[in-house]
Image (tube, coloured by chain):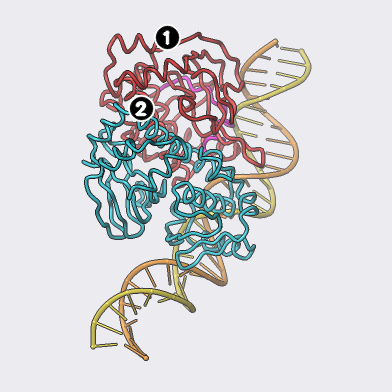
Chain colours: A red, B cyan, C yellow, D orange
DNA sequence: CGGATTATTGACGCTTTTCAAATGCAGTGG
DNA sequence: CCACTGCATTTGAAAAGCGTCAATAATCCG
């Protein structure tokens, strides 16, 4: 059930059966969440740590003028809010982008693992550092690359993260349930422009993207075009090729 | 010597004298670095963890087209690369923006503290989470706000970070050694436009900024204008007001 | 089938970039 | 002290990229 999380962490280190059992034991329950529901709201301190088992979610911030900035996508294996093991409030919200299966992890058990199990402490810290690294790359991506390369880069990243979590073993075709609007809010673009750029990427033969399905027609060209170097994700060689 | 780091961490928790001593003992040596020198290069795994004692540095990424994206500013009290306690290579570089005093912390001692001292483990993790939170805010800032508000927001943040590290007790005037070019590379703007926007902010009576010195003429107005809400930095009430 | 999202298109305007040149300023050496 | 040099700031003009508005087509879902 928490396979995706384990797969992701094992990009970095090997977990013993006991470690995996500890993680599994931290699961209090699993719940189904509908699409477009807030799982965690900014300024809250949730009781449980949420782990995505199935579906997509996003971290987002609401700005003064009411617009939504999506600052991260969350896919199976991603923890929504380990932050609150230490911080006393969330600095952003998390919302489902599809129907979700979510595991509720006991905060106390997470803390206990963090302080009493060096391997898992490493794993949690690693996971936070990776998220930070991804944020840096997203930042560089939006500040420095034009819209077409920017989207290309985002597609490449998602593909790698799918592989890292063991959700696909290919790098050319995945379930991709985002609307163009949700893509635009993360890329810092308007929907209209996002739409036009997507059409260009399609016409160039780089991708197809329809019916909640993304297909990368030419991985190498897309990678080069989007200036994508997966090393910032610190994954295992096997995943990165 | 490591006061700024301690001040920063004590926004979050109280360190015992023993904790402070441990941190101090981790310092192998302090070195002077010239301006515009790379302290850590991407893909390296530095031997020591670097702590800024004096001066400014920046995290940056070099992109395919040769342009530099500054993804973070580092000021006294900031650790440049705890990452490498866990990760096997840097995903970005760090460069001095002014002459620097840098403390070299032993990686082994940091790791030992992380695994054997719950308070310091918390503190390091907290520090990483804050950096991540700041990255999220930077991301939302550049994707969602126009150039003038974007710069206003950045000024507000730096002011708060100065206060958090005990480098000033005011919120209206600091040493600010960045060139407009270095500001532009972080804001995702061209120098030309940065310059024009700065002139507008000056004309509006919000700031003055010359001779490596930033003065905020009207903190409340600047805050409102830049849509700045310091809660994402998770600092103590005293610092945030 | 009907209502509601989502995707697409066109026209227009504004923010920001780029290019190119000018001005100002600090440090250096004679 | 002044001329020279190199860097940082400022200015102008034109073009590009992207956003906004508004309307239409396509698709989804009950």
What residue span does the magenta drawing correspond to?
A173-187
The residue under the point 45% across, 59% down is B176
Residue A177 is a magenta residue: yes
- A137 and A179: which is toward the camera: A137
Q: Tell me the subunit letter for badge 2.
A: B
- A221 and B147: which is toward the camera: B147
Task: Tell which tag, 2 or 1, sits nearer the viewer.
Answer: 2
Q: Relative to A103, is A129 above or below?
A: below
Q: Where is residue B220 in the image (x, y as percent from the top left)?
A: 64, 52
Residue A222 visible in the current orientation: no
- B10 and A153: which is toward the camera: B10
Residue B217 is a magenta residue: no
Q: Position of residue D19 (x, y in %)?
A: 62, 45
Q: What distance separates the C-alpha of mark 2 from that of mark 1?
A: 30 Å
Left or right, B214 with respect to A114, comes to right
Residue B118's tag is 2
Q: Which residue lies furthest to the front in this view?
A: B17
Q: Position of residue B174 (x, y in %)?
A: 49, 59
Mark 1 closeness class: few <14, some 14–19, many ≥20 residues within 10 Å: few
Q: Mark 1 points at which residue?
A: A1
Q: Tell me the subunit letter for badge 1.
A: A
> Image quadrant for the N terminus of chain A?
top left
Do callouts 2 and 1 point to residues on the same chain? no
Residue B179 visible in the current orientation: yes
């Amino acid at each position: 059930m928490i396979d995706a999380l384990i797969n992701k962490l094992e990009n970095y280190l090997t977990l013993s059966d006991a470690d995996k059992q500890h993680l599994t034991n931290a699961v209090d329950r699993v719940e189904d969440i509908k699409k477009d529901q807030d799982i965690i709201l900014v300024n809250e301190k949730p009781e449980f740590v949420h782990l995505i088992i199935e579906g997509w979610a996003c971290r987002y911030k609401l700005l003064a003028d009411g617009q939504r900035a999506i600052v991260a996508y969350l896919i199976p294996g991603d923890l929504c809010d380990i932050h609150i093991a230490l911080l006393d409030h969330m600095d952003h919200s998390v919302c489902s982008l599809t129907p979700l299966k979510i595991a509720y992890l006991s905060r106390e058990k997470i803390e206990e693992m963090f302080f009493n199990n060096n391997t898992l402490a490493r794993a949690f810290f690693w996971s936070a550092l990776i998220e930070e690294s991804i944020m840096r790359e997203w930042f560089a991506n939006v500040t420095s690359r034009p819209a077409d390369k920017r989207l290309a880069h985002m597609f490449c990243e998602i593909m790698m993260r799918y592989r890292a979590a063991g959700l696909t073993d290919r790098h050319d075709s995945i379930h991709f349930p985002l609307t163009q609007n949700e893509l635009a809010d993360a890329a810092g673009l308007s929907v209209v422009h996002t739409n036009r750029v997507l059409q260009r990427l399609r016409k160039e033969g780089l991708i197809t993207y329809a019916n909640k399905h993304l297909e990368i027609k030419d991985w190498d060209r897309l990678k080069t075009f989007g200036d994508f170097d997966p090393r910032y994700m610190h994954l295992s060689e096997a995943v990165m090729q």
